[in-house]
Image: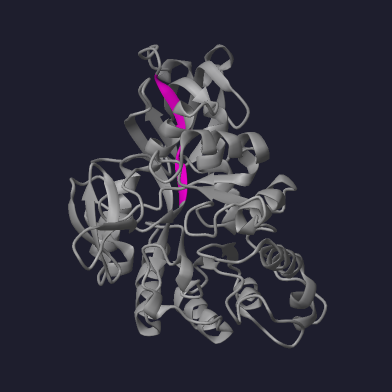
């Protein structure tokens, strides 16, 4: 047997609970073998310890983005070949997102089935960790940058077809609970929620114009399904393993009825559920989608265990300003902000993000959120939601996914599965 050669990384190490001022992370093969203070580093790895790095060098877990439509000039919803999708995933990998869920947008049935099958191949190959379908069971009144003409009522048969095409890799789907067929089922009467849970996918509330009671009822129904409920009855009293006991909310605040003191809508319902530990909210905390004070307030209200930082990135991530596509929609990026191109040529709704997840972490910290909390929301919590307890934290035994940054949180080096990622 050949000797296993360790890789010892050093800097300010961000663990799930603290920052080790002079810490070390030991990688052996594809795993994290040890994490701790340099003073406590076991003797067998002392000779591999690098010199003390520049001040501010920070060692983070590889980041986990569960809502990402593309980057590097390529878009998952528009990819017709593996190389296009791979380019998008690679753009984010080079910037420290070592685990990525590829997001689709609302499209015709045959397009969705083809894209899901294509992306499933990349999950099998280890390029992605799952697939997110943002639609098509959404509110046309809150369509955002999606095509309302392709939106449908809740269809459990289509959910099953997409799940079959995904070969077990459909990890989540965004749905609007007020749309007929989404959350109005019951025993012996399947709806989109029950079909998603049956397929092992996590339902996510988003692109919704629903009032608070409708959202509250959908969250309660979704939680009961994830916990067993009707699902248990359908399998003879047993339970099926789920990725997460909690639903999520797709990019909270964006693409949904706004919060009003006499009409609290989905935002208040989702925040209340998150505060009880029943739901996890996505935040596109890139400085464009949300004001920094909003980001800080949500962290204060519900904590990082109930927050996933996401990019909602599209093809322009890592690319210059210009014209791009997001599914069937034309998008123009100016000053780093992506917006739909209206029929008269003017700018319309925000059309996804252009940041990498480390940029979102940086903006979140700049908003006043502690680095440990921001990293937890960008790595640990999303890994938990998609059912991956081998990712998302610098903990011995987990996959060797590590991001090393400078004092401004710009990437220096990225490791995935213990291997240095080359540009």
Quick one: 165 or 74, which is closer to the camera? 74
Residue 114 horizontal side relative to residue 400, left or right: left
**Quadrant including the N terminus:** top left
Residue 388 spot, x, y in % from top left? 57, 52
Any magenta on residue 64? yes
Residue 411 spot, x, y in % from top left? 33, 31
**349 over 115 or under it: above or below:** above
Which residue is at the far front? 262
Q: Quadrant of residue 270?
A: bottom right
Residue 162 spot, x, y in % from top left? 48, 78
Quick one: 332 or 168, which is closer to the camera? 332
Q: How is the image coloured?
A: one colour
**185 over 357 or under it: above or below:** below
Residue 398 seen in the current view:
no
Residue at image point 38% right, 17% down: 50
Residue 107 seen in the current view:
yes
Q: Quadrant of residue 347?
A: bottom left
Residue at image point 40% right, 38% down: 287
**Quadrant including the C terminus:** top left
Q: Which residues are magenta?
A: 57-65
Residue 96 horizontal side relative to residue 205, left or right: left
Residue at image point 58% right, 50% down: 281
Any magenta on residue 313? no
Residue 389 spot, x, y in % from top left? 60, 49
Q: Main secondary structure of the magenta part?
A: strand
Residue 361 horizontal side relative to residue 411, left or right: right
**310 over 165 or under it: above or below:** above
């Amino acid at each position: 047997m050949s000797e296993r050669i360790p890789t010892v990384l050093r800097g300010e190490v961000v663990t799930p609970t603290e920052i080790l001022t002079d810490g070390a992370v030991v990688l052996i093969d594809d795993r994290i073998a040890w994490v701790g203070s340099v003073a406590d580093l076991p003797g067998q790895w002392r000779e591999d310890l690098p010199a003390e790095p520049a001040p501010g060098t920070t060692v983070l877990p590889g980041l986990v983005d569960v809502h990402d439509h593309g980057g590097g000039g390529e878009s998952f919803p528009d990819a017709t070949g593996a190389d296009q999708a791979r380019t998008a995933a690679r753009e984010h990998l080079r910037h420290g997102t070592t685990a990525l869920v590829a997001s689709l947008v609302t499209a015709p049935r045959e397009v969705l089935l083809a894209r899901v099958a294509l992306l499933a191949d990349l999950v099998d190959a280890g390029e992605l960790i799952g697939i997110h379908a943002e639609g098509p069971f959404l509110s046309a009144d809150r369509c955002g940058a999606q095509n309302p003409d392709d939106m449908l009522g809740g269809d459990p048969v289509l959910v099953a077809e997409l799940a079959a095409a995904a070969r077990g890799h459909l990890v989540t789907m965004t749905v609007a609970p007020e749309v007929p067929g989404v959350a109005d089922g019951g025993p012996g009467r399947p709806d989109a929620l029950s079909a998603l849970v049956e397929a092992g996918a996590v339902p996510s509330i988003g692109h919704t114009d629903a009032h608070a009671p409708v959202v509250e009822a959908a969250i309660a129904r979704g939680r009961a399904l994830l916990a067993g409920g009707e699902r248990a009855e359908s399998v003879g009293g047993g339970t099926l393993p789920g990725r997460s006991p909690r639903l999520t909310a797709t990019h909270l605040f964006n693409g949904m009825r706004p919060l009003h003191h006499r009409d609290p809508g989905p935002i208040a319902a989702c925040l209340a559920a998150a505060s009880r530990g029943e739901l996890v909210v996505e935040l596109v905390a890139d400085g464009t989608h949300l004001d920094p004070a909003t980001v800080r307030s949500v962290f204060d209200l519900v904590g990082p265990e109930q927050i996933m930082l996401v990019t909602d990135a599209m093809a322009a991530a890592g690319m210059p300003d210009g014209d791009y596509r997001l599914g069937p929609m034309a998008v123009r990026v100016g000053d780093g902000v992506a917006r739909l191109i209206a029929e008269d040529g003017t700018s319309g709704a925000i059309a996804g993000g252009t940041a990498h997840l480390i940029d979102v972490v940086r903006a979140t910290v700049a908003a006043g959120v502690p680095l440990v909390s921001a990293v937890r929301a960008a790595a640990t919590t999303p890994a938990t939601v998609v059912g991956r307890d081998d990712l998302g934290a610098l903990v011995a035994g987990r996959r060797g996914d590590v991001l090393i940054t400078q004092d401004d949180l710009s990437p220096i080096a990225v490791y995935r599965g213990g291997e240095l990622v080359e540009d």
